[in-house]
Image (cartoon, rainbow, N blue to C red):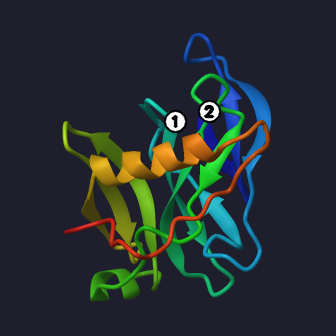
Amino acid sequence: MVHRVIPHARLAIATDARNYKERGPLFWPRPGMWDSKRIGMGAPPIKTVYGWLLFYHGVDDNMVYRLGLALLDVHNPAIVLGRSSEPILEPEEAYEKEGLVPKVVFTCGAVETSSEYLVYYGAGDAVVGLATVSKDIILKWTKHIYDSCSSFHTFEQYGRDEKLFTG
C-alpha cells in the first residue's frame, strides 16, 4: 500500500491485506518542482512489465495541484525507479481552476483497459473528472525509465513535448 503522511508518500506491506507493516517514506516533495510542497496518493499502483506504475498528485509552493507519474521496482516497491519531471495533468479548465479549492486536480483512481489508462481525478475540490491516456505512451515512459536505471535511484525526465491526457 502506498499512502501519504504529509508531506511524503509512504510504503506499507501486508501479506494478508489487513495487517500492514510500515516500511517508511517512499518519496518526498522535490524543491523547485511541480510537487515541491507535498504529494498525495489516490490510485493503487498498477503492475506493468517495467514496474509498478503510480499516478500521484503533487502540490507546488503556490498551492497548485497537478498529476504526475512514478515507477517503482516490480520486485521491491521500496525502490523508486523514476518520477515525471513535469506534470501529466494540471488545472486548465474552469472547473479545475475554480471551485471550493481553486487550481486543483488530484488523483482519485486509475483503471487499466486494453489500450489506455482511465484516470479519475478531483477538480477544484468540487467535481470528479475522467482523463484518458494511451497505454503506449505510458509504457514508452516506463520502458525508458526501466532501461536507464542502474543500482541507484534514477529520477528521469519526462517533458511536455507530448500532451498525455485527452478528455
Q: Which of 140 and 27 is in front in this view?
A: 140
User: Residue 52, labelled with which disc?
Assistant: 1
Q: Which of 74 and 125 is in front in this view?
A: 74
Name which residue type carries label 2.
Asp
Q: Can residue 54 be seen in this view?
A: no
Mark 2 lies on residue: 73
Crowding at mark 1 (Cα within 10 Å: few <14, some 14-19, many 20+): many
Q: In screen coordinates, is 136 left or right of 84?
A: left
* Structural distance between the alpha carbons of marks 1 and 2: 6 Å
Q: Earlier in the sequence, mark 1 or mark 2?
A: 1
Name which residue type carries label 1.
Trp
Using the rendered view, name the quadrant where residue 89 is placed: bottom left
Q: In screen coordinates, is 111 left or right of 101?
A: left
33 over 17 or under it: above or below: below
Q: Do the residues labelled 1 and 2 touch (CB within 8 Å)?
A: yes
Look at 43% across and 57% down and name the residue there: 107
